[in-house]
Image (cartoon, grey):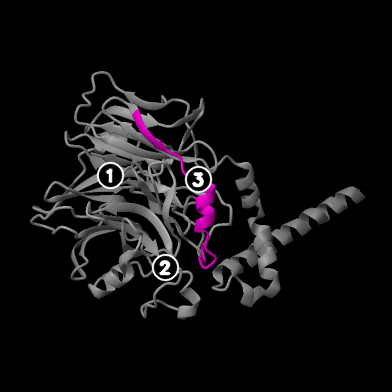
Amino acid sequence: MKKLRIAFIGIVGLFFFSILLASSVRNIYMAGDNGKSRLGFLAQPIKFMAETPSIIKTILSAPEFIVTNSEAKGGLDYSNGVDTKSYPKLLVSYKQKEFGQEFELLDLKNGKSIKKWSPDNASLYEQAFNEDNPRKPSKGSDLYFMHPLMSSDSSLMFTSQLTSLLAKIDKKGELLWLKNDKTYHHTLESNNNGKIYTCTRPFISGKYDFLPGEYDEYKHTLLDDTISIIEENTGDEIFSKSVIEILVENGYKKLLLYKGQIISDQIHLNDIQPALTDSEFWKKDDLLISCRNLSAVFLYRPSTNKILWLQHGPWTNQHDADFYENDKIVVFGNDVIREESIVDERLTHSNLSFTKEKQHNEIYVYNFVNDSTSTPYSRLMSKEKITTYTSGRCDILENGDVIIEETNNGRIIIGDSINKKVEYVKRLDEGHISSLFWSRIIN
């Protein structure tokens, strides 16, 4: 009887302790100062207790880059009778082990490997670590390199999505230069004339009158995404402009606040694509800009600071906007819904979700001539169940086939509007493949 009483008291005590802990954690995360004003010196210990289960789960779980897949054949797998004569080369990025990221150039015509780069990941991360970065990962973290950009001399440039790193290595993998003065993230693109376009974030954001709160409260929190232009040979910055500034100065402040909601990652800049030629609808060096968290794509002219065209949707949470032919653009629509409730109970426990109505990614082609949007590869996307929640790439090839990187699921698919013709995965073992880190076609 005494044992039952002790057990009952223990269960009741644990129940009320859980309620107290949950209430305290809620106060901490709702407070702008991590709960210090409400709970004082107890804030950090309580936060640590709440986060301990997720920390343990992270330690025990498989590395983030490993994807479960026992079906796909490793390497390039061609369907019978595929005509590959017009196919380009493909530059891929993958990881086979922690601190072991590699880049590989593949010939899609015959499936052969042309070249590999294996930079010293740990050394690069160590050199890129910057104490001034308020969102820096822990020192020694195993991160990943993004969207390698190859020059004519086989040197490579790349960013590291989650930290302050932009680096260039030579054809042997040796470091040529490295920058860590701000956060460099997502895409790298070239105008083929020595200028590199990259997404950046300063460690301290700009000050904006339309935001609530005092500047000191949000200057380290607001992700003030910026368009930066870098000189390829030296890494020197040529141009830098905040996307928030661009939108406000062009009369799009309402777009920033169209939901009456503000979050730290209001823009989420994820692609800057320079125009390489003039057309009726853009000029050389105009920029096509993708802002995921606004579900907006716009055409921007840096020389005049003017937005020439902007469209919100039909894509949602999109990536990879590209110029296509002389009068179109192509947008990879992730078409997922984000859940970011803080005060209210969550609608869904998943931060990113597909809806019952739409359960795959989509490729949109916008035509400037008649102001229309089509989805010519919808059957292929549905048939192959292309479902990357984040990231994702696509390019329409010369023969009309499309190449798709299903980033989260570690697959590259090439096909026409209906059928898959080629599939690529980087196999690690019988049951697992590597996630991919933004491939690039090389013509």
Q: Position of residue 226 (x, y in %)?
A: 34, 65
Left or right, 158 with respect to 272, comes to: right
Q: Residue at x 65, y 67 (%)?
A: 24
Q: SS class of the residue under badge 2?
A: loop
Q: Residue at x 38, y 65 (%)?
A: 266
On screen, residue 399 above or below 110: below
Left or right, 394 with respect to 278, comes to: right
Q: Residue at x 33, y 42 (%)?
A: 154
Q: Which residues are magenta?
A: 113-135
On screen, residue 236 above or below 214: above
Q: Nearer the viewer, mark 2 or mark 3?
A: 3
Q: Position of residue 397 (x, y in %)?
A: 20, 37
On screen, residue 123 above or below 246: above
* Quarter of the picture holding the C terminus: top left
Q: Position of residue 217 (x, y in %)?
A: 50, 76
Q: SS class of the residue under badge 1?
A: loop
Q: Residue at x 34, y 24 (%)?
A: 77
User: Disc 3 versus disc 1: distance between alpha carbons?
Assistant: 22 Å
The amino acid type of the residue labelled 1 equals: Ser
Check disc 2 and report the residue beneath it. 202
Disc with the residue nearer the chain's start (2 vs 3):
3
Q: Which quadrant of the view contains residue 308?
A: bottom left
Of residues 178 and 292, which is closer to you in this image?
A: 178
Of residues 324 and 34, which is closer to you in this image?
A: 324
The amino acid type of the residue labelled 3 equals: Asp
Q: SS class of the residue under badge 3?
A: loop
Disc with the residue nearer the chain's start (3 vs 1):
3
Dot 1 surroundings within 10 Å: few (below 14), some, or many (20 or more)? few
Q: Position of residue 351 (x, y in %)?
A: 46, 52
Check disc 3 and report the residue beneath it. 120
